[in-house]
Amino acid sequence: MFDHTIIVAEDDPYVNTLQQLDNAGIAQVRIVPATGAEKFAEFIFKKLNTFVRTETNERVHVKRVEFMEHNKNTAIYEH
């Protein structure tokens, strides 16, 4: 989802322009609710937890996600 892509927040003023790059096959553009380490941790948690719960018939759930942009910028989301 994140590797070799352009990540754009849905409220970015250039979201439509950047989406055109994806439509033209120039770049892979991913539209997400919000950007930043904290929002990426939350986004990944929710997406992964939904998948894991579905795949395991609710027997397993994700407890915590740590997103690391680099060693000085990390965020943890737990529920």
Image (cartoon, rainbow, N blue to C red):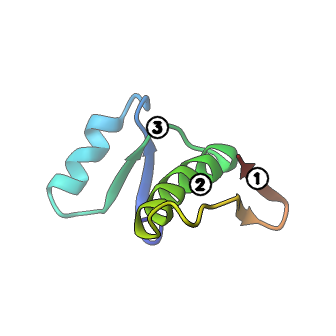
Looking at numbered disc 2 in the image, what kind of residue is underneath it? Phe
Q: Disc 3 designates what residue?
A: 33
Task: Point out the tag, 3 or 2, that comes first from the N-terminus.
Answer: 3
Task: Point out the tag, 3 or 1, that comes first from the N-terminus.
Answer: 3
Q: Disc 1 designates what residue?
A: 75
Residue 70 left/right relative to 13: right
Q: Are marks 3 and 2 in contact (CB under 8 Å)?
A: no
Looking at numbered disc 1 in the image, what kind of residue is underneath it? Ala
Residue farthest along the left direction in this orientation: 24
Q: Residues within 10 Å of mark 1 (few under 14, many from 20)?
A: some
Q: Residues within 10 Å of mark 3 (few under 14, many from 20)?
A: few
Q: Which residue: 41% across, 69% down?
A: 55
Residue 16 left/right relative to 36: left
Asked which secondary structure carries label 2, the reply is helix
Q: Nearer the viewer, residue 28 or 42?
A: 42
Asked which secondary structure carries label 3, the reply is loop
Compute the Cα span from label 3 to label 2.
14 Å
Q: Which residue: 72% across, 50% down?
A: 77
Q: Residue 25: where, in percent of width, then height? A: 18, 63
Compute the Cα span from label 1 to label 2.
11 Å
Q: Residue 37: where, in percent of width, then height? A: 68, 50
Q: Determine whether 52 is above or below 16 in the image.
A: below
Q: Are marks 3 and 1 in contact (CB under 8 Å)?
A: no
Q: Disc 2 designates what residue?
A: 45
Q: Residue 38: where, in percent of width, then height? A: 69, 45
Q: Determine whether 13 is above or below 29 in the image.
A: above
